[in-house]
């Protein structure tokens, strides 16, 4: 008969559905009792989603069955209320929103930067936390070459550009170097960005998450009290399938989805005006309707979004009157309206 410690080690193979982290690292395994009559595993899931809980139970039994010759009982501690996340150690910040995508290559960071600039343009005090530790591109898109300074008590001061307060992993890596880190190191770095950055007074902190659902995403949703999430997708089916993962990620940790943005929605030829739906069209709106979350808008595929970002002058700054800059402004207004509505509901409940 395997020991409780050996069974706990085996359970590190069981991933939390939709995430890269296992249920042991997630803190779900509360007790393992081994006896002649059977093995009892006590779990405390961070969600009350019946499908997710059933999948975890099934995976636990399948993983432990080859190691024991007695019945396995999985006991679920069901929270009486929605699980609470740690209070963010970010005094002075009214709202934290996460910009996420189920897969890479959908222009998530480009949307995050232009959305942040649009929010600033309508009078919001905005910070940007580039949490994409593997591919930090925010410094390039904002044309930032300087490094953050620190205060006398060793707190980091974000770099300011275009009225945005910015912090990024890209500031801490030498040029051309990649971050080759495991989960615990990612967790430590992002925790440092959360706890040890002097953000000052902000209306909204925009967090650019890495694509997918992994360690960085878990750290942000567990250690900050997110006001909501924005999901970026492109219209083609392969990207839309991954929208489900993003929506489920936020649902499982009880973070409201503020809306879906369809990027690269279509292309208008600058010479003849012909509209080409290169990656199909309308999938983001249909997916938002299917999940009963708001659809914030479409961002067409235009050359200026790429070229201006590469030059460090994003489109919303370079050409505020451009139709796509106006599209970002309309999305920003919707985001602010949904955050204000959320705050009003919270005050009404209290």
Image (cartoon, grey):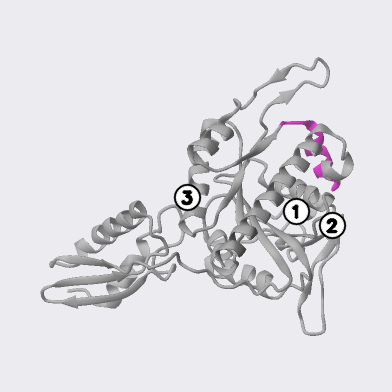
In the figure, 269 relative to 174: above or below? above
In whole angstroms, how far apart are the C-alphas of marks 3 and 1?
Answer: 26 Å
State the residue at coordinates (24%, 64%). Answer: 64
Q: Secondary structure at mark 3?
A: helix
Residue at the limit of the structure toward the left, as seen here: 37
Front disc: 3 or 1: 3
Q: Quadrant of residue 93?
A: bottom right
Across and down, in percent, residue 254 comes to 50, 58
Is the Cβ of the residue at disc 3 closer than 8 Å to that at disc 2?
no
User: Measured along the vertical axis of the image, is residue 281 above or below residue 127?
Assistant: above
Circle number at residue 138:
1
Tag 2 secondary structure:
loop
Residue 178, percent across and down?
A: 67, 58
Q: Is residue 257 covered in magenta?
A: no
From the viewer's perspective, tell me whether residue 339 is left or right of residue 273.
Answer: left
Give the residue number, with chain letter if any, for mark 3: 248
User: Splitting the image into 4 quarters, where does residue 324 fall?
Assistant: top right
Q: Position of residue 158 (x, y in %)?
A: 80, 67
Question: Magenta residues?
Answer: 300-313
Residue closest to the eye, 216 or 94? 94
* For residue 282, side relative to residue 321 (left or right): left
Identify the residue under disc 2: 144
Q: Is residue 306 magenta?
A: yes
Residue 51 coordinates in the image, percent (x, y): 34, 51
How many C-alpha atoms fall within 10 Å of the one at disc 3: few (<14), some, or many (≥20)?
A: many
């Amino acid at each position: 008969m395997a020991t409780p410690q050996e069974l706990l080690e085996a359970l590190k193979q069981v991933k939390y559905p939709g995430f890269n982290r296992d249920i042991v690292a997630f803190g779900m395994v509360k007790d393992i009792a081994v006896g002649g009559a059977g093995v009892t595993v006590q779990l405390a899931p961070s969600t009350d989603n019946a499908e997710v809980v059933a999948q975890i139970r099934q995976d636990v039994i399948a993983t432990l069955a080859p190691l024991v010759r007695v019945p396995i009982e999985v006991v679920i501690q069901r929270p009486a209320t929605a699980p609470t996340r740690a209070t963010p150690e970010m005094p002075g910040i009214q709202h934290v929103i996460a910009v996420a995508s189920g897969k890479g290559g959908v222009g998530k960071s480009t949307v995050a930067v232009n959305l942040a600039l649009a929010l600033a343009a309508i009078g919001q005090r905005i910070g940007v936390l580039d949490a994409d530790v593997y591919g930090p591109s925010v410094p390039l898109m904002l044309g930032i070459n300087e490094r953050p300074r620190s205060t006398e008590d060793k707190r980091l001061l974000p770099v300011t550009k275009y009225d945005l307060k910015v912090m990024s992993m890209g500031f801490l890596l030498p040029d051309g170097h990649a971050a080759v880190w495991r989960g615990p190191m990612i967790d430590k770095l992002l925790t440092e960005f959360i706890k040890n950055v002097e953000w000052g007074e902000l209306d909204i902190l925009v967090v650019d998450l890495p694509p997918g659902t992994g360690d960085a995403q878990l750290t942000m949703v567990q250690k900050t009290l997110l006001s909501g999430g924005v999901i970026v997708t492109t219209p083609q089916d392969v990207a839309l399938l991954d929208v489900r993962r993003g929506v489920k990620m936020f649902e499982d940790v009880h973070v409201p989805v503020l809306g879906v943005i369809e990027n690269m929605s279509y292309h208008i030829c600058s010479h003849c005006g012909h509209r080409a739906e290169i990656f199909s069209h309308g999938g983001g709106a249909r997916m938002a309707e299917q999940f009963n979350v708001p659809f914030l808008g479409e961002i067409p595929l235009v050359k200026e979004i790429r070229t201006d970002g590469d030059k460090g002058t994003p489109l919303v700054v370079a050409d505020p009157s451009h139709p796509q800059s106006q599209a970002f402004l309309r999305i920003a207004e919707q985001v602010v309206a949904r955050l204000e509505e959320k705050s009003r509901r919270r005050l009404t409940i209290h």
